[in-house]
Amino acid sequence: MRISAYADGPVPLVEGPGPMWDAAPGVGSLSPMKKIVLLALAAAAAVFAKKKLDASKAEQALWAQATDQV
């Protein structure tokens, strides 16, 4: 048993949300729903950028084939 110097009893070993939330200052103030929405938006933007990049590479390959000097 741990003896506390406080009059109201023993001090809990863990206080607050924990070290995981303290790692990124400012992010902890967002609600969990906002974090999920931001994560989904970031994933959608990454997928969109990847598709645009792939389409650009495919078009570049077609032009390279069409203008290839035989």
Image (tube, rainbow, N blue to C red):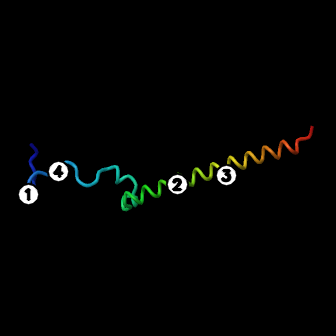
Q: CA distance from mark 2 to mark 1?
A: 47 Å
**Residue sticking out furthest to the right:** 70
Please provide percent x and percent y for residue 37: 45, 58
- Front one among 20 and 51: 51
- Residue at screen point 38% across, 52% down: 23
Mark nearest the camera among 2 and 1 is 2
**Residue type, label 3:** Lys
Q: Which residue is mark 2?
A: 42
Please provide percent x and percent y for residue 49: 62, 52
- Front one among 28 and 57: 57
- Residue 8 tag number: 1
Mark nearest the camera among 4 and 3 is 3
Which numbered disc flags the more N-terminal residue, 2 or 1? Answer: 1
Secondary structure under tag 1 reads: loop
Q: Which residue is mark 4?
A: 12
Secondary structure under tag 2 reads: helix
Neighbourhood count class around disc 3 (C-alpha, 10 Å): few under 14, some 14–19, many 20 upward: few
Q: CA distance from mark 4 to mark 3?
A: 53 Å
Q: Are marks 3 and 1 in contact (CB under 8 Å)?
A: no
Q: Which residue is mark 3?
A: 52
